[in-house]
Image (cartoon, rainbow, N blue to C red):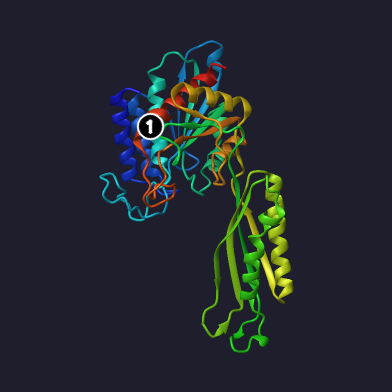
Amino acid sequence: MDPSLHHRLTQWRRHLHAHPGLTLHEQHTAAFVVEKLRELGVSEITPGVGGHGVVATLRRGSGQGANRAVGLRADMDALPIQETNLALPWSSTIPGVMHACGHDGHTTALLGAAKLLLDDTSWSGTVQLVFQPAEEGGGGARAMIADGLFQRFPMDRIFGWHNWPGLPVGTVAVHERAVMAAGARFDIAFEGHSGHAALPHMTRDPMLGLGHAIVALQSIVARGVDPLASGVVSVTIARAGEAQNQIAGRAELMGTARWLDESVGDYIEQRIREVAAGVAASFGLSAIAHFSRGVPVTANSAAEREIAAGAAAAVAPLRRDMPPAMTGEDFSWFLAEVPGAFVWIGNGPAEAGRELHNAGYDFSDDVLPYASGFLAEAAKRALAG
């Protein structure tokens, strides 16, 4: 990448970091994207897709290749986290909101890919640049799909990426199939009978059920899932009680579950419901359990995986030995509609609070040439058939 373009992209990335748009509130980010696309010379831009989503279309050439289309995706939203990098000139100016997951870098890298493709006359076909809102639990991918993304902007395949702390800057990791996990949220409410804490025999204590349920729930994977498979059940919130001398009438717990194979997800859901019912019966309580599935497994298609690996090797160091992560990714909904691949690109060391979703995180601008180069190269290889 030309150093002047890298400098330009760095300035854009830092602007986005300083002015983050929270999930479902990305209107200023979307307006910035539209402004910069026009500045680059992109004429075919559609804002307002699935909320604050933006789709820009690049077309070039004629003949057989011109009939092919590929999508490149970047997510735009920030998180409700108070940034601690206050010494940075580009630290967040929005209290309680920051780009703690690097979506500012993802968005900027796709703008960079647009510039690289505009300046390259070697390709023929259509490239759809998909700037997605609301990735952080806001349902942005599904909203864009519901708004006719793949009908209004046809594409044969789609590619995306995520920066990855812990990988050297620019190293691209391509997984064989599963990249990131499917997930769900669950909650269980135990209803009992409240009363004086000194007279427990006159109550039905839901706190007792809550305590036993925590142990049982977090044993589901350890004693029910094949050790060679992957699953997580974590209880993360527990609530009960109003006074120290009262046994409460209601206790609630909440948590999250993750898996890489749908059969494991089905088993986890079944066991959570069984644990809730069994614990309630043991202590004379009633229980209501909810299990709400979120994103599916983010899984690469075989052909697109190889396109991604070839593109990565052309512009950066390539890794093909990374295990999947149990985090989830909204891009999985796009992969449920069209074939594609999702890769990780190293963001450098993860120590000293530089992990994803940490208040001290910052995207490394040194990643931008690798990420933009990968996206442009993947598009060209996909269009070449």
**Quarter of the figure with the N terminus:** top left
**Quarter of the figure with the C terminus:** top right
Q: In the displayed image of the protein, which residue is found farthest to the bottom?
A: 199
Task: Determine whether, in the image, residue 232 is placed left or right of residue 44.
Answer: right
Q: Quadrant of residue 236?
A: bottom right
Residue 75 coordinates in the image, percent (x, y): 46, 39
Pick the front one: 314 or 243? 314
Can you see residue 68?
yes
- In the image, residue 263 sits, relative to residue 219, either above or below, namely above
Residue on which the image places disc 1: 368
> In the image, what residue occupies the spot 64% across and 57% down?
291
- In the image, residue 196 sits, relative to residue 174, either above or below, namely below
Task: Determine whether, in the image, residue 265 is placed left or right of residue 28.
Answer: right
Can you see residue 43?
no
Residue 112 coordinates in the image, percent (x, y): 38, 28
Q: Quadrant of residue 305?
A: top right
Check disc 1 and report its element: helix, strand or loop. Answer: helix
Residue 12 coordinates in the image, percent (x, y): 32, 35
- In the image, residue 125 sits, relative to residue 100, either above or below, namely above
> In the image, what residue occupies the spot 38% across and 32% down?
368
Residue 193 coordinates in the image, percent (x, y): 65, 81
Pick the front one: 172 or 155? 172
- In the image, residue 376 sits, relative to residue 33, either above or below, namely above
- Mark 1, other Cα within 10 Å: few <14 / some 14–19 / many ≥20: many
Query: How many tags in the picture?
Result: 1
Pick the front one: 259 or 151? 259
Q: In the displayed image of the protein, which residue is found farthest to the top?
A: 63
Pick the front one: 268 or 71? 268
Q: Quadrant of residue 185?
A: bottom right
| Kind of residue indicated by mark 1 | Leu
